[in-house]
Amino acid sequence: MSRTIKSPLPQDSQDMPPKTKEKGRKSGTQKKKKNLSVDVEAEAKHRLMVLEKELLLDHLALRRDESRRAKASEELLKQKLQGLEAELKEARSEEKAIYAEMSRQHQALKEKLETRSNQLEEEVRSLREQLEMCQKEAKAEREEAEQALRERDQTLTQLRAQVVDMEAKYQEILHGSLDQLLAKLRAVKPHWDGAVLRLHAKHKEQLRQFGLNPLDL
């Protein structure tokens, strides 16, 4: 924007000499140029101020927009954070519940194992006592069996010796008795043969009397 300002010349300048008039014209031109320069500088400053104001307003609008976005992001982050905190709280609660349940199960299993271990120790102790008793009984029975076998072998040996001795004695007695019997038989044989013949004839006669043939018998 340019402005034209016309300044009237002083009345006294008409009465001035030519050189003075020339100087006056030059002075007026310089004043016009100076005023024009002042107006241009003022206009430039005004435009600069307007631009600065617009830039400032744009900057403020941008900052407000960034602030709104930052606030919205902050709200979103807060919501996410609250959700994560809720999930973390729930996870910790579940973790505590799981830990408590595992601790309870561990304690119950520990008590059960201790009880079972005590039972097994008692059973092992009882079985060891029974084993020792059985071993003692087995040892005693084995010793008794070995003693009985030794006694049986000894008795059998004695019996065999007695049997052998008795057989020898019985054989001796038998031989003696047979010898005596043979001697007696030899002594009574003549008388025995006659008696047998007479007895035989008698029986034959009795059979004939009953109508029986002695040869059919």
Image (cartoon, rainbow, N blue to C red):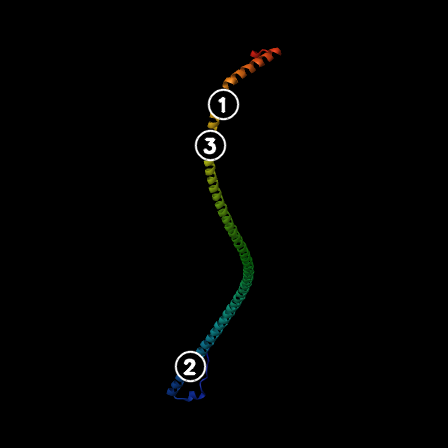
Please report whichever mark, 1 or 3, sits nearer to the chain's N-terminal start: 3
| In the image, farthest residue toward the right | 210
Instruction: Label 1: state its secondary structure.
Output: helix
Task: Tell whether label 2 touches label 3 (CB within 8 Å).
Answer: no
Query: Which of the pair 17/157 is nearer the observer?
Result: 157
Residue 132 in view of the camera = yes
Q: Which mark is residue 34?
A: 2
Q: Which mark is residue 184?
A: 1
Quadrant location of the C terminus in the rendered image = top right
Give percent across and percent down for residue 140: 50, 47
Instruction: Label 3: state its secondary structure.
Output: helix
Give percent across and percent down for residue 63: 50, 70
**Residue drawn at point x = 48 percent, y = 27 percent:** 177
Q: Read off the residue under disc 3.
A: 169
What amino acid type should be assigned to the residue bearing mark 3?
Lys
Instruction: Label 2: state its secondary structure.
Output: helix
